[in-house]
Amino acid sequence: MQPIPFIAASAEEAVAQIRARLGPDAVVLNVRPLPANGIARLWQKPMIEVLAHLPEAPAPQAAPISEALAEFRQQLNEIKQQVATRPQHTERRAPAQREPGQPLHAEQELCAPALADSLQDDFSIPEAEQGNGNWRVGTMLQKSGLLPLHVQSIMDRLRSQHGDEAPAALSDEIKLARALLAKLWRKPRPLAPHSVHALIGPAGSGKTTCLCKWLTRAALVEGSSARVWRLDGAMANTAESLSVYCEILGLPSERSWQPGHANISEDIGFIDLPGVDWRQPVALKELSGQLKQYGSPRLHLVLNGAYDTSILLAQVRAFSALPIDDLIITHLDEESRWGKVWNFALGTNYSLRHFGTGQNIPGDFCEPSAEMVLARQFPCK
Ligand SMILES: Nc1nc2c(ncn2[C@@H]2O[C@H](COP(=O)(O)OP(=O)(O)OP(=O)(O)O)[C@@H](O)[C@H]2O)c(=O)[nH]1
Ligand SMILES: [Mg+2]
């Protein structure tokens, strides 16, 4: 649906307009102050323009599965060429059976026993399929970003539930894997009313950007009252844009914390802090002490999802010294292998609260679900 501009004098007025026209599922794409014209600006209240739309169901993305099949096909072509250049081998082996003119599917060809036999010394089984009988979905899971450890645990469960013999069709294997993964998804805890939330994490992971997105959703879509603290840490918090953004939304933002601030009358409070060097235990200890002064707010660890999984897990381990509630994964617009997020779901005790999928404030922000991630991993059900 095309974005619709709403012009209002306040955040509350904008919410009322958006709700009346688009309902509660509306997503805010942009907010900007409107300049008052001429002399009228002396008495006119500044207006804001809010762009909102109703998101459509995400279009299935064909890339990951077609990439996997393209790779299968490429491997197959290489195998065929190797067979063609070895006449003795092909004489000994019977060709795979098929009707004349019937197209060969890559997976059928790879599974044809005669062909597989003839290539035993040339064709190594992908790591994810070793010891997994004729199940093929493990390779797909690994290619979509799951660590081999988690792939193996999924494959072990699939085989113990459904037997060593994989279903004939790859699509049925995928269905079983999807159903199993969906059961392993952990939902984040509901937010307590009047709670304060601190977004913490490594430098530049997208904390302030996410805070602005979350704040706009809370204020403009859910109609909540909100309050923001932009606080310094070991480094100064230079995110001036956050204060400007709060001004546009007409929300209070403060630069210092006073005793008693933890008991807020607003529906929700947000603390923005500068990034912390997660490789330095001292820096994490300092952050921990600082957070205690703020009455131990709810902690959301913000990580750049485009980083390598080994770095992400090392960051989770470092920050787990703090009482983290859940994770927010950003930069997913820069990552095609969304299967990576299962490494958090399966390899940590944390749930995933939000995904950031772009630089736009306040758009490109969503509450993830197993279905959403699986739809990206396996666009064809
Ligand atoms: N592509 C993309 N860029 C993002 C996303 N989230 C944030 N960014 C960009 O990443 C950069 C850092 O974002 P910030 O929100 O300032 O990060 P931060 O964690 O607050 O940074 P520090 O406070 O300096 O630690 C900015 O250029 C953002 O526009 C995202 O989901 N996708
Ligand atoms: Mg910041």
Image (cartoon, rainbow, N blue to C red):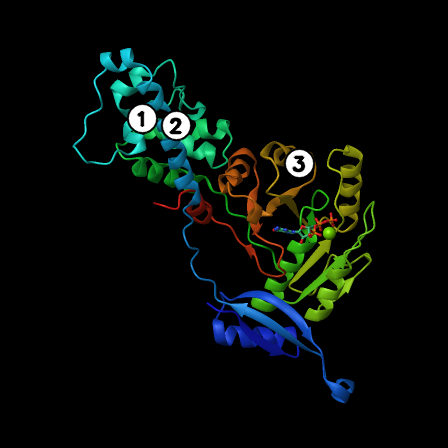
Q: Is residue 300 left or right of residue 71?
A: right
Residue at (45%, 46%) from the top-left corner?
376
As rendered, which of 146 and 95 lies closer to the eye? 95
Amino acid type, mark 2:
Gln
Label 3: few (<14), some or many (≥20) within 10 Å?
some
How much space separates mark 3 and mark 1, taking CA atoms?
A: 40 Å
Q: Marks 2/1: CA distance?
A: 9 Å
Quick one: label 2 or label 1, which is nearer the N terminus? 2
Q: Looking at numbered disc 1 in the image, what kind of residue is underneath it?
A: Leu
Q: Nearer the viewer, residue 90 or 73?
A: 90
Residue identifier under label 1? 110
Type of the residue with mark 3: Gln
Residue visible at 80% across and 40% down in the picture: 286
The residue carrying mark 2 is 75
Q: Is residue 196 at all visible to an observer of this figure?
A: no
**How many C-alpha atoms fall within 10 Å of the one at disc 1: few (<14), some, or many (≥20)?**
some
Labels 2 & 1 near each other (Cβ < 8 A): yes
